[in-house]
Image: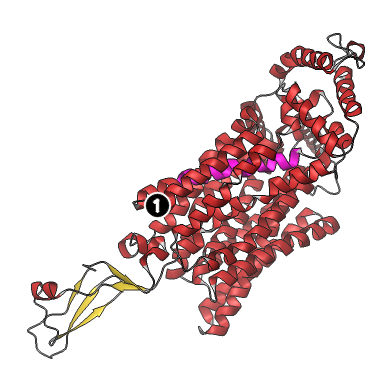
Amino acid sequence: MKSSQIDVDGVLRALGQTGFFHTSQCILICASVIVASTNSLFYIFYALTPEYRCNNLTDFQLNQYNISINEVSLIYDKCSIHILNIDGRDTTENRTLDCLNGYYYNTPVDKSIVSQWDLVCDRQGLAELTQTFYNLGQVLSGLLTTCLIEKFGRKPLRVSSHIMLLVFNLIAAYSPSYWVFTAMKLLTGGVREIYFLSSVALVCELYPKEKRIIMSGIFMCCWGLYNTTLGLIAYLLKDYGWNTLFLFNVVISGYFLVDYFFLKESIRWLFANSKVKTAKKIIRNAAKQNNIDFDSVWNMTLKDTAVKHSDGHVNETSFEYQNSDSKVQQDATTVVEDTQSETKEESSMFVNLLAIFKSPYLRKVTIVVSIEWAVNTTAWNSIFQMLEVLAGNIYLNSFIMSLFDVFAIGIYSVLARRFGHKISLQCLKSLAATSVISASLIKIFAESNNTMEYIILALYILAVAGLNAASCGDYIYTSELYPTQIRSIGSGFATTFTRIVCLTSPFLKLLALVVPWAPGIIIGTGCIVSSILVQVFLPETGDRVLPQTIEDVTQMEKEKKGNKIYTISHRE
């Protein structure tokens, strides 16, 4: 039985949307969103690069290289040892040696993966590569997660992803080598994507369709609020090894026990997959918790089904409401069996994917939306991962940035309601572009001092707030641009494209170390270009009727083509 064959939204409304069942389930889903935050963003704390230099040469090595400490000066640099002649004679040449004995760090070795595996000098960039592999895991998982969620259900995927996160984080915490750790990051990224998408599906399908965007916003606000706690958690654990952060992930992933015993499957998914008996059990439980009469809700479900199958297969009189529960279940199952053939007539995912590129309107929307999502998300991730190279305390900066993110989401809601999406996005992207470009200009032209460094930090915080609000706005705006039939396909394509572009985000920190002004110019240029594309090529959704189906898109394009032909012939 497909959810479209009964009024699932009507059932959810009849159950009462503010009762104990809905509230408790929503809290259960959102309570563990911190798992997504910590797995994604703890990287900025466990991959810090401490001050370091080459370890001292041993007496044996001094003799081996014929070095007399009375005739030369030994300078232990970060990646080399400089041997300088100081006696004024030519008997000893200036030389440079590699760090023969490894590196000396100003913090304990186990405080960072950088010092743990000497990811400096000729191995610089390998720490950032671990996060790139994490993003790659999200890309690969994102291609399969939607299918897995639809096939196996929301709750099983969420519970199993919790368990796998527990296992992979535990292995990562005690990785014997860098490459084992990197492999665990790849797997963690993939599983985290499954957890996040299944959670979003659960919280959205808990309520009727008119509240999905609101619930998505609430879910993202929870994500933002949890992000504000990361700096505090990392600060409290900073005196322990880097693997303590992974053990923290292990502990909170133990939440799968709560999910397993108390979280309910999506009623919408159960009806869509013919699991009527389970759906009925959950509806009965929800009605009891919300003090709603179960029989009236369930009978309404059967009536809706009967009306939608009044073509001869099933009609309303075929349901004997006076009979026992077993009879009702039998009738409902009959409806399921009679309607299975209808699923074959639905468009396949592949056909819908082709549709977004065959239609000029949908192709334009998909390309611009993908670029817009990629710029906002990649820029946000890049700045957040650059916290180490900005002024101030990294733990406090993380808290302030995340707090501004939460406020910015609320500001976008106000702006979008008053001025529409395009103007709101334009304002936020202009704020972000102006902030990061100003920070780069200060780096280029102003004298470097503490005051200027903190001004640059403030500008980046403003940019992050604008980018995060724009990212949340993108989600709502995109859902309004696409016809209902292919909304998930269009959003999924944009998400996959964004994840691919995000593979580069960890390396902007390295670029900032070499060319401090470059990241701001790159991010600012991306914001300006994507903003122009949105303003020029995408319609405003608030003041015009947009196509709701693929057929509407086709009709709209025919009308435009006809109007164009009429205009040309009229001029002639």
Q: Which colour scheme is used?
A: secondary structure
Image position of 31 with respect to 110: above or below? above
Tell me residue 197's x, y (percent): 63, 42
Q: In this view, does 281 lie to the left or right of 77?
A: right
7 left or right of 255 in image? right
**Residue closest to the eye, 69 or 423:** 69
Q: Give the structural element (helix, strand or loop) at label 1.
A: loop
Residue most extreme to the top: 312
Q: Where does residue 465 sit, x and y in percent of width and height?
A: 67, 64
Q: Quadrant of residue 336?
A: top right
Residue 338 picture location, percent across and down: 77, 12
Tell me, yes or no, whether the highlighted magenta stretch contains residue 196: yes
The residue drawn where x is 59% and y is 67% is 232
Query: How dense is the environment of label 1, judged by Cα within 10 Å: few (below 14), some, or many (20 and up)?
Result: few
Quarter holding residue 485: top right
The boundaries of the magenta stretch are 185-205
Please name the predominant secondary structure of the magenta segment in the image. helix
Q: Residue at x 60, y 42 (%)?
A: 256
- Residue 194 in view in this figure: yes
* Residue of label 1: 174
Residue 539 seen anywhere in this rendered image of the structure: no
Asked whether 6 or 94 is in front, the reply is 6
Amino acid on which the number 1 mark rests in the picture: Tyr
